[in-house]
Amino acid sequence: MKRQNKFRSEQKTNVQLLEKALSLKTRLFSMIALRRAGRWLRRYSLIVIGAIALAYGIWLCCNYAIEKAYSLSIDNISYKSHRDLISKEQALKILGIEGSVNMATLDVAGMQKKLENIPSIDSVRIRAELPDTLHIEVDERIPIVFVEMESGASTGRRTRLFMDPKGVLFPVNAEYHSKYMGVPTWYLQLADVKELKVGERIAEERCRPIRELIAASNAYDLTEIPAIREIFRPKEWKIQLTLDNGTSVTMQVYEIKEQMERLAMILEHAQVTGMKARSINVIQRINPTVIPAEDTEQEKEEEKAGDKKKKSREHR
């Protein structure tokens, strides 16, 4: 406890007792009261002035910070495309970013959603970094095949979309996908997809063999295995291919890689012997079936000979 001066305390008490004995008018206008009031005014005036000065300083700081924030413009835009399909200029055009962009008014979440709404884009990450940098990271969908309904030829509904490795369907955009316009076409059946439309996803068990087929064929040079032009699945277990050289290939949905190895060996042997294969069945591990293209001409000659015999009998 703080020690007090005994005599001073007693003196203060005596002064207060004497003041109480005086009249109210005398007490209010006495020198002691005036000095006391002066000390009180000085003390609280300093407090009030200090508070006002502090509030004014805070207001100035906040006003400066707000003005500084509104004056921040994005001078650097860092852009990364995982697949190199959509360029920086194309992404900025989609976002509507032209000229100077203010950091304080930047809607990062809205910009990210705008890019994610593009069906050709799988995922987007956008973040602003003070004082003047905007980072944009885009992962596009890779088209592995065109998809059409097999019934389109008869119904006239020839809608064509792309499919990515996850089975997601998205629109064909020549501006973005110029390098993928030569991918094969997979003709779908009603069992493959509920509706052929953007955003639809083909079931994993349906698109897995196609994905493995494309991956296995990409491991070979076009001189070894010509490009695949068309893909059909006439049965659950069966895949029918049409190669770019016109050869028809029959496969099953299992052991895709091993069957492509057999196909490469058959085509290599055919190239060495000068034989053109009309159709190849690579399902059998031993002695796969190969039908030469020459058989087609032979069959035509046999049909002509048969027609002649039939007409000769009718004439008789």
Image: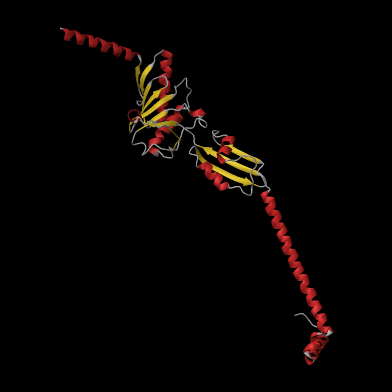
In this orientation, which residue lies closer to the viewer: 167 or 44? 44
User: Which image quadrant is residue 305 in?
Assistant: top left
The C terminus, quarter of image: top left
Position of residue 229 in the picture relative to residue 96 (left or right): left
Query: Can you name the residue that lies furthest to the bottom here?
Result: 21
The answer to whether residue 89 shows anywhere in this view is yes
Estimate the x, y position of residue 11 in percent, counting from the top left.
82, 88
- 233 in relation to 111, above or below: above
State the count of labels: 0
Estimate the x, y position of residue 261 in percent, counting from the top left.
42, 25
**Residue placed at 53% from the left, 43% from the top?**
114
In this orientation, which residue lies closer to the viewer: 121 or 259? 121
The answer to whether residue 287 shows anywhere in this view is no
Query: Can you name the residue that lies furthest to the right here?
Result: 31
Estimate the x, y position of residue 44 in percent, counting from the top left.
76, 73
**Residue placed at 78% from the left, 75% from the top?**
41
In this orientation, which residue lies closer to the viewer: 140 or 60? 60
The N terminus, quarter of image: bottom right
**Residue placed at 42% from the left, 26% from the top?**
260
- 161 in relation to 64, above or below: above
Estimate the x, y position of residue 9 in percent, counting from the top left.
80, 86
